[in-house]
Amino acid sequence: MGSAARLQGATKRFGAVWALEGVDFELAPGEIHGLLGENGAGKTTLARVVAGLLTPEAGRVEIGGREVRLGSAAEARALGVAMVHQHFSLVPRFTGFENVVLFNAEAWTPHGGVRAGYRERIEARAAELGLPVELDVPVERMGVADRQRIEILKALMGETRVLLLDEPTAVLAPQEVEGLFAVLRRVAAAGTGIVLVAHKLDEVLAAADRVTVLRRGRWVLTREAAAVTARELADAMVGARSPGSGPRDAAGAGPRLEGAAGAGPSDDEQRRPPRHTPEPPIVAELRDVAAVSAGGAGLRGVSLAVRRGEILGIAGVGGNGQRTLAAVLAGLQAPDEGNAALPDEVGWIPQERDGEGLVNGFTIAENVALAVHVKGAYRKGVWFDWAAVEEAAAVLVGQMDVRSGAPGVAAGTLSGGNQQKMVAGREFLRSGELLVAESPTRGLDVKATVAVRERIRALAREGGRRPGIVLISADLDEILEQSDRIAVMVRGRLIPVPPEDHNPAAIGELMLAVRG
């Protein structure tokens, strides 16, 4: 059997940073190949080289057993290579149908019209793959899972020999993940080689035939998925014992950020105060809030109260109003009806770090300055104290383990996971009495996920500030591990989850509106 795609000695660097250093990788036709590694390990760079988005400085690229020199994604697409990015490349105002035809050259006549019968071809392909899609709905009104199905359908309309998926399960509910993997198995069974870039080791092992681990731009191992454990993969990723395998991981070491402790509290420390202890004060409250959203669900009669030092977990399938809820809580959108009582200063870790969390052309220090410029610690009278900001940025880089980062480095040069760590660390600095965290560990590796979750718990439990925290996530493990109370967003309404239902099955059913 030949290879669907192969890299030999692939080398790529960005400035002084080696994203890939002499990496060998092979994808067989019809296999699902999991690609693992810490943030900044080179996973997305490898995928982009195969997809024609990046040109290696050295090494050999083969597609279908033939050496190629790819100058663009269009050239790779012509050879049967398609990539579904972590941040979707859809036109928000276009419908699902329009986005699919926009990507596929064979959909168009020489005169610029859509070929007769092409919609029927799309519908037939969606049915064949088992992909329920909304072709006539604008993408901006779709949930995350619906957008992902459009992306996959878009990529598989042509003759696709290689399909690259970058973090496809990051914001999906467990039932949606199972559905996605069923689709991928059907695609692979038809002969397409699939590269699955992911961080959730149990998911990768459940879906993949083989796995490859990269570490700091270098190949570490390639094994049959059935012959390796999640613990072995985690150790290979970090080059040492993985988080949770013994003494607390060293990710928490280093300079302390204000409000972000290095080591998480023990299980006893994480428990809420006894019932006879007076309830902490409310730091934020919504009463019968309704809010319209341009894309996805708005809010319908939402009421909630967040107390100092508690973590309120909000679960939900994308597109059910979580984004609007976050915008209202962060003070970015005023309610159309009802009342919102919010503190003056709110930290906000957005779901979309591109465009919402960062200015890619700004340095790390400048991005920190955007969040802390009103704080007295970063001013000298009426003047801005740049030295204090740069010092805080340097501490943030060390504390959050932002790889290849220095205060003067442009945020856009960091890998996606390192950008996420930077945004989280900055908002830990900014949060006053309330922190709103949307999928705060999205795109983070195992080690960084542990570190960020520990810091969130520590922020709520330790020190004098102890803000209330609203954690919005489709990752049920994250919600169950972190939260004191849990609610589910369904079609714009907030449904409290009783303690006896704090388990993945019950919450998953509520998320998908199976019951409730």
Image (spheres, helix red, strand yellow):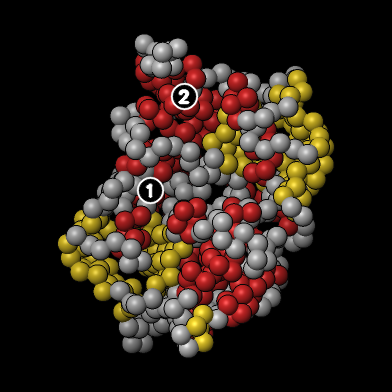
Q: Looking at the image, which is closer to me, 353 or 233?
A: 353
Rendered location of residue 343, percent (x, y): 33, 77
- In the image, 420: left or right of 319? right
In the rendered view, tell whether residue 493 sits above or below residue 397: above
Point out residue 315 in the picture as x, y percentages from the top left corner. 38, 56
Between discs 1 and 2, the one toward the N terminus: 2
Q: Residue at x 56, y 61 (%)?
A: 362
Q: Nearer the viewer, residue 412 or 134?
A: 412
Question: Which amino acid is tagged 2?
Answer: Leu
Where does label 2 land, which residue?
129
Q: Is residue 417 visible?
A: no
Q: Is residue 92 above or below residue 311?
A: above
Residue matched to label 1: 317
Instruction: Return the x and y of residue 170 as percentages of the image width and height.
Output: 51, 48
Left or right of 294? Residue 157 is: right
Say which element carries label 1: loop
In this rendering, is residue 214 above or below 134?
Answer: below
Residue sticking out furthest to the left: 337
Quadrant in the picture for residue 225: top right
Q: Which mark is residue 163?
A: none
Q: Is residue 242 visible?
A: yes
Quadrant in the picture for the N terminus: top right
| For residue 207, above or below residue 415 | above
Instruction: Check disc 1: other Cα within 10 Å, few if <14, some if 14-19, many if 20+.
Output: many
Query: Residue at image x 77%, y 23%?
Result: 67
Please give the name of the residue rendered at 45% of the width and 74% of the height, measured from the top-left corner.
431
Farthest residue in the front direction? 383
